[in-house]
Amino acid sequence: MKFLKFLVAAACAVPFAGSAQAADLELWRLDCGSVEVRDLSLFSDAFGYGGTHRTLTDSCYLIRHDKQYMLWDTGLPAALIGSKPDAKAPIVPSLTIDIPSQLAKIGVKPEQIGYIGISHYHFDHVGQAAAFPDAVLLIGKPDFDALKLPPPPFGVEPKLLQPWLSGKSKVEPVSGDHDVFGDGSVVVLKMPGHTPGETSLLLRLAESGPVLLSGDVVHFEEQLANRGVPPFNWDRAQSLASMDRLTSIAKNLGAKIIIQHDENDIAKLPAFPKSAR
Ligand SMILES: [Zn+2]
């Protein structure tokens, strides 16, 4: 009986997306830079991808939920614009346009951004967050905790999140999954492995259908097919479990997976300033 009550309560708690009151949801793909990888074997701890190189995209996203705006990831730091890349470095990040300039093209001001969802703490995902200090930061709790501990983990520059680390701006550390607007249309999904607090984002778009923004559960499609785990991931077993969760969700919901660093994947969404609905 107790269990039955639990099931009823749980069913009532699950928001129903697609009802008559469903929110108007819109998604824009933004250009948040690119990362040249000279030797792709850096992304396999099983000696895969040897002898190949690849340009990874650094995409980030604007979401409109009725009149509320949310960014998903904030790309590479704006200081990279106009900088000379180190041609000999194994990984070369570059950026040509910042997020506020792109938002201006569709008439959105930085202060209109109510939420910033961050897939994980690496510098190529939090780079321009500080341009939106009015936004509430949603970030996996284990990642937010790690940002406060010296020394910072690999690929982390805490100063890029200073408004939230200093307590001036509001942060909501996320444990488990998190339904951002309470109607099931935008849900942060727990996907640990790449980092301890890694997350992906599920969007239920009315016309395009469900979309999964991958975070860095993987960096390119082949990694899902042959389970490529980068040696710099935080936990190998959890990385594999999160790949499994991502592909299972996609299968069950018929969702499109958008691997944020893969140019073939981000091409599944319209080019800015066009949007998906
Ligand atoms: Zn990344």
Image (cartoon, rainbow, N blue to C red):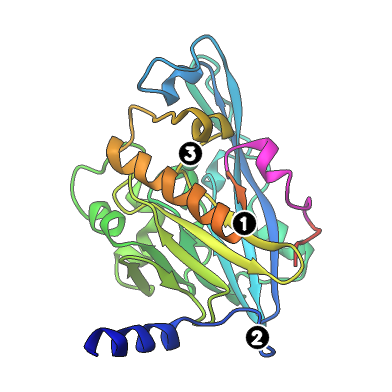
Quadrant containing the N terminus in the rendered view: bottom left
Q: Nearer the viewer, mark 2 or mark 3?
A: 2
Q: Nearer the N terminus, badge 3 or badge 1?
A: 3
| Cα–Cα span, label 2 and label 3 | 33 Å
- Name the residue tied to disc 1: 255
**Helix, strand or loop status at disc 2:** loop
Q: Which residues are magenta?
A: 260-272
Q: How many marks?
A: 3
| Cα–Cα span, label 1 and label 2 | 19 Å
221 up-or-down from 245: above or below: above
Under mark 2, the amino acid is Ser
- Name the residue tied to disc 2: 19
- Name the residue tied to disc 3: 218
Q: Are marks 3 and 1 in contact (CB under 8 Å)?
A: no
**Residue 194 in sight in this render:** no
| Cα–Cα span, label 3 and label 1 | 16 Å
Q: Position of residue 31 (x, y in %)?
A: 67, 47
Other residues around mark 1 within 10 Å, as few (<14) / some (14–19) / many (≥20): many
> Does the numbered disc 1 mark a residue whose Cβ is under 8 Å from ligand 1?
no
Q: Mark on residue 219?
A: none
Q: Main secondary structure of the magenta part?
A: loop
Asked if residue 262 lies in the magenta stretch, the reply is: yes
Asked if residue 177 lies in the magenta stretch, the reply is: no
Q: Residue at x 18, y 46 (%)?
A: 150
Q: Is residue 133 left or right of residue 71?
A: left
